[in-house]
Image (tube, rainbow, N blue to C red):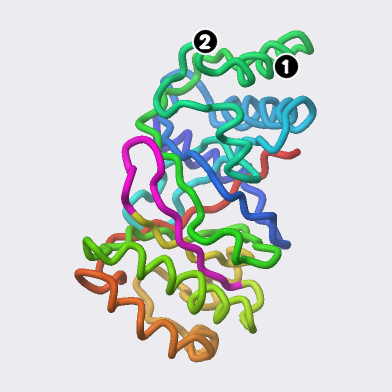
């Protein structure tokens, strides 16, 4: 049943051809569709919630993605996206405290949405543990964009090298990718709240699924010449990446997530 639902979900995927604004903070949690419900129900619910947040909120939205390759293949994930950290802290001031008194601004938002026919109540899926991810050195990025597919790997950062690593990310890694690698970019996020607090993840952003396939035609294939050319432009700065880790990042499991169009 679950496999059938996830297969039907793929019909509703919309691959962005153009990049979208990268949020400074996003929350992420795995989702399981309950028996008796369909993928379109989930998609339509998220679209409704996202439209309401865009209309009545400030710097808050909802996103949803689908595991296409890797460790979490077929896993559905979603969560909030916040344009800036200040927006996250405005709606959720206290870590892990979602009581009514602790989130007055978010409660006011949901009440406004409910008054206008957009309810957050649902009984179509179950949510797993969440993590809030904050983009490292976000202020150093110029017009950061994220494409329709992202590859995610946990960074096995060596304890005690956090400050040096974040400085490298801001001053070397980001500038190298932003200089001349259209459609292909990397971002580093740090777990700020929830299950992944204190850990780091690498997001490889591809403009589209087609671009990912141009670089990696199948999960088992070696990188193509097109990827090697793109990687050559950042080879020098990438050599330094593993200086900050216990082992090579590429030895960690990955998941490629396809962005699902939930409107605005």
Q: Nearer the viewer, residue 108 or 227?
A: 108
Position of residue 149 in the picture relative to residue 202 (left or right): right
Residue drawn where x is 73% and y is 62% of the image: 18
Query: Which contiguous range is marked in magenta?
Result: 184-199
Q: Magenta includes 197? A: yes
Position of residue 246 in the picture relative to residue 22 (left or right): left
Quarter where residue 245 is shown: bottom left
Q: Please name which of the two marks, 1 or 2, marks the residue nearer to the observer.
A: 2
Prevailing SS of the magenta stretch: strand
Q: Say above or below: 66 vs 127.
A: below
Residue drawn where x is 43% and y is 90% of the image: 236
Q: Say above or below: 138 vs 171.
A: above
**Residue 256 image label:** none
Q: Secondary structure at mark 1?
A: helix
Measured from the top left, where is residue 91 in percent x and y? 59, 27
**Residue 101 image label:** 2
Q: Quadrant of the C terminus?
A: top right
Q: Which residue position holds label 1?
A: 113
Residue drawn where x is 50% and y is 86% of the image: 234
Quarter where residue 235 is shown: bottom left
């Amino acid at each position: 049943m679950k496999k059938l639902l996830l297969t039907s979900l793929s019909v509703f995927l919309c691959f962005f051809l153009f990049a979208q604004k990268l949020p400074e903070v996003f929350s992420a949690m795995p989702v399981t569709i309950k028996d008796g419900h369909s993928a379109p129900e989930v998609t339509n619910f998220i679209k409704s919630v996202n439209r309401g947040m865009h209309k009545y909120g400030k710097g808050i939205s909802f996103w949803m993605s689908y595991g296409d390759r890797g460790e979490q293949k077929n896993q559905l994930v979603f969560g909030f996206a916040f344009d800036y950290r200040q927006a996250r802290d405005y709606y959720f001031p206290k870590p892990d405290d979602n009581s009514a008194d602790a989130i007055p601004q978010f409660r006011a938002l949901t009440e406004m949405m409910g008054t206008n026919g957009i309810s957050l109540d649902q009984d179509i899926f179950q949510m797993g543990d969440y993590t809030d991810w904050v983009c490292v050195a976000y202020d150093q990025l110029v017009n950061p964009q994220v494409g329709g597919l992202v590859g995610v790997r946990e960074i096995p950062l060596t304890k005690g090298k956090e400050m040096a690593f974040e400085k490298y990310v801001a001053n070397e890694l980001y500038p190298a990718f932003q200089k001349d690698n259209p459609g292909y970019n990397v971002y580093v996020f740090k777990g700020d709240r929830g299950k992944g607090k204190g850990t780091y993840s690498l997001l490889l952003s591809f403009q589209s699924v087609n671009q990912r396939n141009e670089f990696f035609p199948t999960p088992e294939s070696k990188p193509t010449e097109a990827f090697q050319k793109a990687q050559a432009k950042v080879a020098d700065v990438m050599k330094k990446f593993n200086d900050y880790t216990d082992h090579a990042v590429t030895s960690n499991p990955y998941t490629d997530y396809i962005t699902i169009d939930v409107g605005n």
